[in-house]
Amino acid sequence: MATLGLNADEQAAVERFRAEVAEPSMTNLVIVDFWAEWCGPCKQLTPVLEKVAADYAGKGVILAKINVDEQPFIAAQFRVQSIPTVYAVFQGQPVADLTNARTESQLKSMLDQILRQLPVEGAEAKAEHEVEPLLAMAEEVLASGDHARAANIFSQIIEMAPTSAEAHAGLIRAQIGVGDLAAADAALVAVPEDLAKDAAIGQARSALALAHEAPAPEESAALAAAVAANPDDHGARFALAGAQIAAGDRDAAADGLLHIIAADRGWNDGAARTRLLELIEAVGLEDAWARAQRRRLSDILFG
């Protein structure tokens, strides 16, 4: 926005626009709200804009307010004909008209769409990039069996990136490995509401549910003996599968559950099938092992 030929007030308005909108928009998405003191709808919209901007600050969203009475030159440049008028600006250019978004949900929906299309990188995204190596290390430690150390690493990652679903899920799984189900329950409760439907959290939730239903470790030998003595004892085989899941022997657990389904798919209202699906979800639906078990299940049900 050139300043040649402008009077002092217009030049001041341009400089203010550069500082508050143009320059920040080089790396952030700036919500520009054109308003006036006498505008009732503007005052109704203000708290909505302020709340959403605060909620999305970590995603690189900034709110800039332009009073059309004090800065008519800027309003004219944007061809503002009525207020409130709200634009999203990125890299100095308007990229969307947000004026019709008058509720929090409408505004967030539009921002989500915009942020998916633009290379806006807020503090949350930067933090996630920084913790990726730490997440990989934590997963390696967890896979090695050092659950307590893994839990400590995941906790530190959560402090750095509170919105990392992988870190929250990892902490839950690590606490399960430690055997502290109360701590795992607390970690699940602490998951931010907007992450509750994330696939990683779903896997951790399923793993925790399975852990709560598993028999005590000392019961495993007795259950194994009962199954050996009577292979048709579905109750003992089902309970043994729970113990095997808790011990991390998912292959043996899947074999036992599939044995029950093949022998009597309706046993206990389909409990074996339900438990197998819970195990598959806990492992991850796209995991190669999980896909193999789903094929085995399909072969029994539809073969």
Image (cartoon, rainbow, N blue to C red):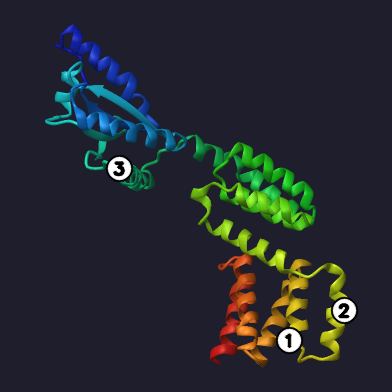
Q: In the image, what residue occupies the spot 33% across and 44% down?
A: 114
Q: Is residue 252 visible?
A: no
Q: Is residue 131 above or below residue 243?
A: above
Q: Residues within 10 Å of mark 1 (few under 14, many from 20)?
A: many
Q: Which mark is residue 67?
A: none
State the image quarter where residue 4 is shown.
top left
Which amino acid type is shown beneath numbered disc 1?
His
**Residue in the foreground of this view, choosing between 267 and 9:** 267
For the C terminus, which image quadrant?
Answer: bottom right
Residue at the disc numbered 3: 103
Which badge, 2 or 1, is on the more N-terminal residue? Answer: 2
Q: Dot 2: what SS?
A: helix
**Residue in the foreground of this view, choosing between 215 and 280:** 215
Residue 88, position as x, y percentages in the image: 29, 36
Which badge, 1 or 3, is on the more N-terminal residue? Answer: 3
- Disc 3 from disc 2: Cα separation: 60 Å
Q: In the image, what residue occupies the spot 38% across and 37% down?
A: 52
Q: Which mark is residue 222?
A: 2
Which badge, 3 or 2, is on the more N-terminal residue? Answer: 3
- Disc 2 from disc 1: Cα separation: 14 Å
Residue at the disc numbered 1: 234
Which amino acid type is shown beneath numbered disc 2?
Ala
Q: In the image, what residue occupies the spot 58% across and 81% down?
A: 295
Q: Dot 3: what SS?
A: loop
For the N terminus, which image quadrant?
Answer: top left
